[in-house]
Amino acid sequence: MLTVWLDPGRIKRGLRPNLRWGAPLRRGDHYTLVVSDHWRDLQGTALTKSYFKKLIATDRDSLPPDPMTWTIHPPAHDTRKELTIDVKSTLDYSLLTSSLLVINETGKITSGKWQVGKDERNVSFIPDEPWMEGRYQLQVETRLEDLAGNNINRPFDVDLKAKPKEAVSAKMISLPFEIP
């Protein structure tokens, strides 16, 4: 996994570096990300070859993820089949595996394993024990971010000249679902 950080001063509108030098990426321009074979992985092993990824810059993403638009696909009870959640947009892989909890109707955390799907647009949960029939809550920490750094509470870049939108202030959002 590689995370590339661009200077927030260059990305956020109205800040000096952005005003002086402009945005580091321009919509429609083509870029190539190069990971050199001289780099080493976390264990210190040299990469076997250089990696090249061609990119095209798109429009600014300034919309926070909205769990209220997600679709939860519950499995049948008495199975260990996965609970699948379509999160509608690409979210941060690491946060997807650490910011979600499944709570049963007695308030107990359901133990199991999270798996992130293709393009980080869905996530599934496989319980350690078979699902019991009943009501559950998917609890989502509002620190969960998309790839542009927008989290559920607020966008990464706020237009200070625009009328402010009402921000979410909770640390958790609960989405109910039922296991039939």
Image: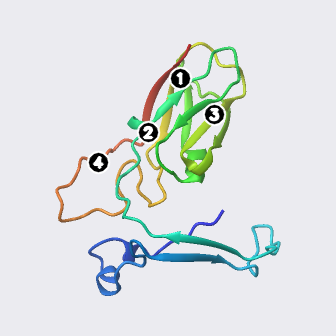
Residue at mark 2 to residue at mark 1: CA–CA distance: 14 Å
Residue 167 - label: 4
Q: Residues within 10 Å of mark 3 (few under 14, many from 20)?
A: many
Q: Position of residue 58 (x, y in %)?
A: 41, 66
Separation (CA) of disc 4 from disc 3: 28 Å
Amino acid residing under circle 2:
Met
Disc with the residue nearer the chain's start (1 vs 4): 1
Residue at horizontal 47 percent and vertical 54 percent from the top: 146
Judged left or right of residue 20, residue 83 is: right
Disc 2 crowd, CA 10 A, few/some/many (<14, 14-19, 20+): some
Q: Amino acid at mark 4?
A: Ala
Say which residue label 1 marks. 107
| Residue 74 position within the rendered picture, expressed as x and y whole percent measured from the top left | 56, 24
Q: Considering the numbered disc 3 on the image, is that residue within a helix, a strand or a loop?
A: strand
* Marks 1, 3: nearer the viewer: 3
Q: Which residue is under mark 2?
A: 172
Query: Which of marks 4 and 2 precedes in the sequence?
Result: 4
Label 1 CA crowd tier, 10 Å (few <14, some 14–19, many 20+): few
Identified at 64% across, 77% down, the residue is 34
Q: Quadrant of residue 174?
A: top left
Instruction: Check disc 1 and report its element: helix, strand or loop.
Output: loop
Mark 4 Cα-neighbour bin, 10 Å: few <14, some 14–19, many ≥20: few
Q: Position of residue 99 (x, y in %)?
A: 54, 44
Q: Which residue is mark 3?
A: 125
Q: Amino acid at mark 3?
A: Phe
Q: Which amino acid does the dot numbered 1 rest on?
A: Gly
Cα gap from disc 2 to disc 4, whole angstroms = 13 Å
Q: Are marks 1 and 4 in contact (CB under 8 Å)?
A: no
